[in-house]
Image (cartoon, helix red, strand yellow):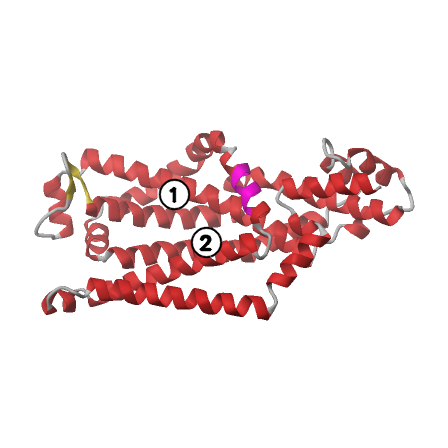
Amino acid sequence: MTARRTEVETWFLDHGLPYFVAEERDAARAGLRPRRLVPFLTLLLAVAVVAGLTVRWLSTRDDAEQAAGQAAGNGSSGLALWLSILVLGLLCYGATALHARPILGFALSRTLGSVRFLVPMASRALPLLLVFVTFLFVNAEAWQMTSNLPFGLLWFTVLLMLGLAVLFLLVRLPEEVDRVDDEVDDAFIVRACAGTPLEAASREVADDPGVDPQDFAQVAGFEKWNLILVLLVIQTVQVVLLSVTVFVFFMLFGSLVMEPQTQLAWTQLDTLQAAPYLSHVSLSLMKVSLFLASFSGFYFTVSAVTDDTYRRQFFSVVESQLERAVGMRAVYLATRARS
């Protein structure tokens, strides 16, 4: 039993489920204790504030007229940098102190290993969206709005879109976990554990009339959040990849059809900041493409969970992983109870 337990726990760690292992859960709980968490958050906030104030100070070293005209942009640049440092710091703390590195590693490898499915998914999801978003792209107001936004404020808008998408997923993904663990039965665990170290044990549990897999199926606490984080990272990376696809499309499309004179007329700028030897590829084109790509990413996020058509294409990639994890956990707990 000890050898099987070690093998199963190794499988959990390799598949991004560290909180299914008791020792890893205890280490994560220790990382959330105030005596460790509060000093880190204090240091992180101090670093973020200092970095934001430094950027603001460096940006206002011009003459008074330029500084007055750029005040809003300087403030937004500092805020965007502050948020970026805060997010990166929390990710680093989660990967180290909270032992979430296996979660991030597995989710990223699982998603990047499915890049070959990106083209089929994009070919199904993008056409209808691009029909709508392209009308915004060939719109003078959209170009004028994004061109007049300081880059710091534009980046803050992108982070805001990403934050809203993550918040939406954090609301909906727990419902997916609850739905799957309610479906656990004998056939479910046998199907979920096929090809895993618990394949034989799943059949034993299913054939035992005194054991009901549903008694061990409900996922809560750290284990539930483990599943949610795996799904969150996979879905987020998928959305980011598709958003990058939208960004590249608009950059190519704009460089082909948007003449510099048209860009100047639509942005109402005096001069156009263009790339060397590429007069059509301007800073304004990059800004409007980035804004529409971030908007498209939020649209993808909502559609991937709520719309049945998109759901089959996007969420089906991770649904099998969720079912296997829930089934493995139920068999693992049932086997320990039987022994």
In the rendered image, residue 110, in percent from the top left (x then y), is placed at 55, 37
In percent of the image, x 36 and y 67: which residue is there? Answer: 49
- Report the residue at 11% width, 48% height from top: 265
Q: Relative to 67, is 97 on the left or the right?
A: right
**Few, some or many residues within 10 Å of mark 1 (<14, 14–19, 20+):** many
- Relative image position of residue 264 (x, y in whole percent): 11, 47
Residue type, numbered disc 2 = Ala
The CA distance from mark 2 to mark 1 is: 12 Å
Q: Nearer the viewer, residue 70 or 251?
A: 70
**Image quadrant where one finds the N terminus:** top right
The magenta span reads: 104-110
Q: How would you classify the magenta stretch by its main secondary structure?
A: helix
Neighbours of disc 2 within 10 Å: few (<14), some (14-19), many (20+): many
Q: The residue tagged with tag 2: helix, strand or loop?
A: helix
Residue 154 among magenta residues: no
SS assignment at label 1: helix
Q: Residue at x 16, y 38 (%)?
A: 280
Residue pointed to by mark 1: 243
- Relative horizontal placement of residue 80, taking residue 6 as reference (left or right): left
Q: Earlier along the polypeptide chain: callout 2 or callout 1?
A: 2
Can you identify the residue that label 2 sits on?
Answer: 165
How many numbered callouts? 2
- Asked whether, in this view, residue 126 is left or right of residue 313, the answer is left
Comparing 11 with 273, the one in front is 11
Most extreme residue toward the left is 270
Residue 247 place in picture, x, y as percent: 32, 41
Give the residue type at disc 1: Ser
Residue 88 image position (x, y, % from top left): 44, 55
